[in-house]
Image: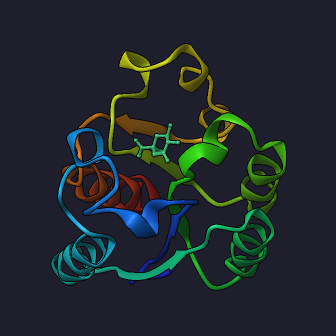
Amino acid sequence: MAATPNILVIHGPNLNLLGTREPDIYGHATLADIDGDLAAQAGALGCSVESYQSNHEGELIDRIQAAMGSSQGILINPGGLTHSSVSLRDALAATGLPVLEVHLSNVFAREPFRHQSFVSGIAVGVISGLGARGYGVGLEALVAHIRG
Ligand code: DQA
């Protein structure tokens, strides 16, 4: 196992709009705020992070495939693809890497169609409803999982 695990952070569709997107649901932190906090936290945890956002399913899948051999874990908020994408789930599973799923909102307190996740079944854990703080909690938990 790598002494300094590299964590791929994946942000799915519409998360580029954080800060202005339905702030009553998703909060006021921007994606740059979240990525900046994760980068700072990575130093303290002794890991490195690479963040990637796309609104395109195929681009997300390409980036996830590229993590094989270069990352030791994946922290992902799949956005709406959580509830629709078998292909995204298959790509994550194909890497063989531990996956930690994060949602800003509590998807279980929202519309019924958000209660199903295609990702949760292959994730080591799920954090939902802690807002931007959930990413930091997720990173710490994922690194601890990797270190065993
Ligand atoms: C989300 C929840 C999803 O249902 C939604 O489609 C998103 C964001 C969250 O972070 O709460 O885009 O993943």
For the C terminus, the quadrant is bottom left
Residue drawn at (82%, 42%) of the image:
86
Say if 114 sits above or below 39 in the image: above
Residue 44 drawn above or below residue 82 = below
Residue 1 visible somewhere in the drawing:
no
Name the colour scheme.
rainbow
User: Depth check: 122 or 29 in front?
Assistant: 29
The residue located at (23%, 81%) in the rendering is: 36
Q: Position of residue 106 (x, y in %)?
A: 34, 29
**Going by the image, does 116 lie left or right of 23?**
right
Picture quadrant of residue 121? top right
| Quadrant assignment, res 32 | bottom left
Q: How far across and down, in percent of the image, does residue 135 sit?
A: 30, 56
Specify whether 102 is left or right of 52.
left
> On the image, which quarter does residue 57 sit in?
bottom right
**Residue 3 point in image, percent of width and height:** 41, 82
